[in-house]
Amino acid sequence: HCETPSVGFNAKEAHSIVEECVDGVSAGEDYNHNMEQSLTHLVKLGKACKYIVTCAVVQKSTHGFQTASSCFWNTTSDGTCTIRWENQTMNCIVNIFAIAIVL
């Protein structure tokens, strides 16, 4: 699920960038390196934003997996995007929060 404000954060771009990161982790690449790479690529978008990226990777089980987040911000310039990925053995949830920097 992605929210796209008319100005500022572009959730579709962010989703695409982080999806590549998650695919890399699922292929056995280094988790920390891929998270750093996703932040680097987000910064390269050239938006005047601060980014927060969280990622939870858990083994699939019969107990389920839930996450939640809540934000209070400027909905015209700030934004969020959540990427959900899973395979037969694990679930991965990545949350991106972008907060516009007002100069």
Image: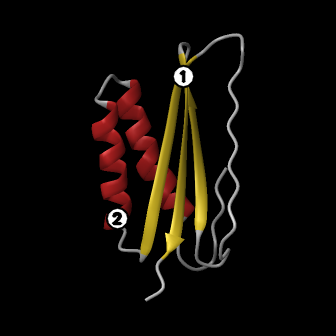
Percent from the top left, x then y, of residue 68?
A: 70, 43
Kindly identify the residue that appears in the image at 38 percent across and 40 percent down: 21
Judge left or right: residue 98 versus residue 32: right
Q: Residue pushed farthest bottom?
A: 103
Q: Note whether 44 is above or below 15 in the view shown.
A: below
Judge left or right: residue 5 versus residue 8: right
Kindly identify the residue that appears in the image at 53 percent across and 13 percent down: 89
Q: Nearer the viewer, residue 12 or 59?
A: 59
Q: Note whether 62 is above or below 70 in the view shown.
A: above
Sequence-first tag of 1 and 2: 2
Q: Residue pushed farthest top?
A: 62
Q: How is the image coloured?
A: secondary structure
Q: What's the mark number on residue 58? A: 1
Secondary-structure class at tag 2: helix
Q: Note whether 16 is above or below 65 in the view shown.
A: below
Looking at the rendering, which quadrant does residue 61 occupy?
top right
Circle 2 Cα neighbour tier, 10 Å, few/some/many (<14 / 14–19 / ≥20): some
- CA gap, disc 1 to disc 2? 27 Å
In the image, what residue type sits under mark 2?
Val
Secondary-structure class at tag 1: strand
Judge left or right: residue 102 versus residue 33: right
Q: What's the mark number on residue 43? A: 2
In the image, what residue type sits under mark 1?
Val
| Total marks in image | 2
Q: Nearer the viewer, residue 36 or 83?
A: 36
Split into 4 quadrants, where in the image is the C terminus? Answer: bottom left
Circle 1 Cα neighbour tier, 10 Å, few/some/many (<14 / 14–19 / ≥20): some
Kindly identify the residue that appears in the image at 46 percent across and 79 percent down: 101
Percent from the top left, x then y, of residue 86?
A: 56, 25
Q: Which is in the foreground here, disc 1 or disc 2? A: 1
Kindly identify the residue that appears in the image at 30 percent across and 56 percent down: 40
